[in-house]
Image (cartoon, helix red, strand yellow):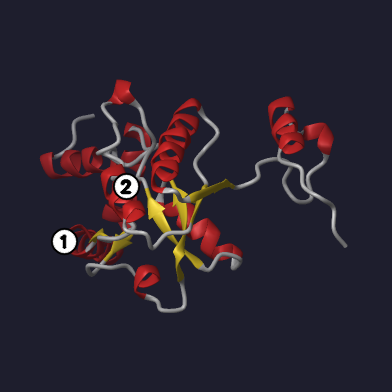
Amino acid sequence: MKHAPLVDQLIHAFTCLPGVGPRSAQRMAYALLDRGREQGRRLGDALHAAMDGVQHCQRCRNYAEAELCPICESPKRDASLICIVSTPADVLAFEQSGEYLGQYFVLMGELSPLDGIGPRELGLDVLEQRLQGGEIRELILATGTTVEGEATAHYILDLAQDAGVQVTRIAQGVPMGGDLEFVDGATLAQALRARRPFES
């Protein structure tokens, strides 16, 4: 079936989203056109406002509507403690835990030379300048355990050591409430390596 040009354009626009193929995009487009015209207009307004109004924080590279994001602006956050994460979704996960009161540095990816993602694309030149400034006392590495995540962590470790900044890594391992029989061997091995004293 051939769609009208505007319908075809709408379907194609939805396919830019991760995990949305042509069929899912078609269902979304039909849903908005059949029963959701007002929601579609609100979606369009929100997309337009976000594309024009959201930028990267000048200090941590997270999403922001001003030069600095609310976390970097907050006087209650410890600016000497920086957690390195791969994506803004990682920041949200840490914030929901309520345990972390430092600041962040968001890489927006991980080193992947084959995909053209090098240190500059991750803002590591900005991080290096901050490390040289002397304000940071500890970096917490919270990158993934993939090959790219490990390569990124080691690159950042070298930068921090050159600046004399302490580096720690979040423990990785068995999730709370998880049964060992369902945990893979690599995760168990990492959990054993990252073990710490048991305290009451």
Examine the rendering and report whether any part of residue 144 can be seen: yes
Q: Which of the two labelled residues, at mark 2 and mark 1, occupies the earlier sequence position?
A: 1
User: Looking at numbered disc 2 in the image, what kind of residue is underneath it?
Assistant: Glu
User: Looking at numbered disc 1 in the image, what kind of residue is underneath it?
Assistant: Asp
Spot the residue most to the top. 114
Marker disc for residue 52: 1
Q: Residue at x 30, y 60 (%)?
A: 59
> In the shown orientation, is residue 104 left or right of residue 43?
right
Nearer the observer: mark 2 or 1; the answer is 2
Q: Residue at x 85, y 53 (%)?
A: 198
Up-down relation of residue 59 to residue 184 (above or below): below
Q: Locate residue 128, reporting x and y percent.
A: 32, 47
Q: Locate residue 183, reporting x and y percent.
A: 75, 33
Could you say whether the residue bearing mark 1 is in a helix, strand or loop? helix
Quadrant location of the C terminus in the rendered image? bottom right
Q: Residue at x 19, y 65 (%)?
A: 53
User: Along the line of sight, which residue is nearer the eye, 166 or 15?
Assistant: 166
Q: Locate residue 88, reporting x and y percent.
A: 40, 53
Q: Which class describes the residues within 10 Å of circle 2: few (<14), some (14-19), or many (20+)?
A: some
Quadrant location of the N terminus in the rendered image? top left
Could you say whether the residue bearing mark 2 is in a helix, strand or loop? helix
Question: Which residue is denoted by mark 2 in the rendering?
Answer: 128
> In the shown orientation, is residue 186 left or right of residue 26?
right
Q: Locate residue 62, reporting x and y percent.
A: 34, 57
Which image quadrant for residue 151? top left
